[in-house]
Image (spheres, rainbow, N blue to C red):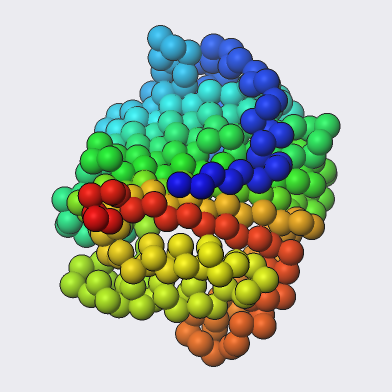
Amino acid sequence: MKYFIPTALVAMMAMPADAFERMMRSDCQVGFEKLAELMQPDDTSTAAMSNGIRVTPQGWCEMRGGTAGLEDAEFGTLEWRAEGVTRWTRDGIPPLALEVRITGLDPDEMQGGMNTGRPNVDVEVLLRQLPDAGMIVIERAVMENNAGDSMTVSGVFERVFLSSPSMMQVSMGSAAFKAGLISLTLEGTHENPFGFGVDVEMRGVPQAQRDAAFDLISKLPDGVVDDASRAELTAFAGDLPKPVGTLEVSVSSAQGLGLMQVGMWMYNSLEAVISDDVDGSELEILLHGISVEADWAPDAQVAD
């Protein structure tokens, strides 16, 4: 397997990681209540959920599904910790770092209440901001189950300044994706093990899944993905719906891909592109300066 990591990610990985301090229960509660007020200001269960927050022996804030206010929660545990938490609890701006762990997510529920018997999924995410550089770094985002399936994502976003609420508003228009790396390891027992929404039925139509993937890959402009990487993606698509092996995809942007630009394009054009109502020129405009490299390494026994 070849390995490729964008330069921006290499630089990020070389930075020393700050140690997280032990969370205080009061900070856990205030932090949660401020977030709940922002996202669901009329939720009458916020007080009960906040009261149920505890601090683990390892110093994480923790909420448990099935407790007061979370009787219908579709997870086992939700844990988090933050570096510089008073930035959020006192000043209303994001902490310098945030780590979140969720256990017991049901992919069947995530995909609309199916009944496939897929194992539950655990998620862990570590986000860090570099204020002087104006960057947000996804150091690690992992989804995995106990069947051997896992997905790991890392990435860098630039022109993000979160020192005050006003600067946060400015960053909504300036933030841009710079580089990212996705590694997907699939054991092959379960289709769509993480419960991602797909346009084709998950069962009974493997060729439809392959055709949809082939069509999407064919729409990627030549300037975005070279022949070798397109062949790797096509080989992966050919192994759907239950590929066995590891797919790595590296994405980088020379100028930075503006998030506002992406959002507007998706709102106006994504459905048309997928349904063949437009040609590849819109994708070429959107993805100008983007480079995608891919490597599909099927399991040796399957490949043989």
Q: Nearer the viewer, residue 191 or 94?
A: 191
Task: Say if 24 sits above or below 263 in the image.
Answer: above
User: Residue 178, position in %: x, y?
Assistant: 70, 50
Residue occupying image coordinates x 72% and y 75%: 285
Task: Say if 9 sits above or below 99 in the image.
Answer: below
Number of callouts in the render? 0
User: Residue 157, position in %: x, y?
Assistant: 70, 46
Question: Quadrant location of residue 237?
Answer: bottom left
Task: Say if 47 sits above or below 236 in the image.
Answer: above
Q: Is residue 52 visible?
A: yes
Residue occupying image coordinates x 34% and y 30%: 77
User: Residue 64, position in %: x, y?
Assistant: 33, 28
- Left or right: residue 287 versus residue 193 is right
- Left or right: residue 109 versus residue 248 is left
User: Residue 68, position in %: x, y?
Assistant: 32, 30
Q: Nearer the viewer, residue 234 or 286?
A: 234
Residue farthest bottom in this picture: 277
Q: Nearer the viewer, residue 265 or 65?
A: 265
Residue occupying image coordinates x 67% and y 71%: 223
Q: Nearer the viewer, residue 139 or 210?
A: 210
Q: Is residue 71 visible?
A: no
Question: Quadrant location of residue 146?
Answer: top left
Question: Quadrant location of residue 192?
Answer: bottom left
Residue farthest front in this picture: 304
- Quarter of the picture holding the C terminus: bottom left
Residue occupying image coordinates x 67% and y 83%: 281
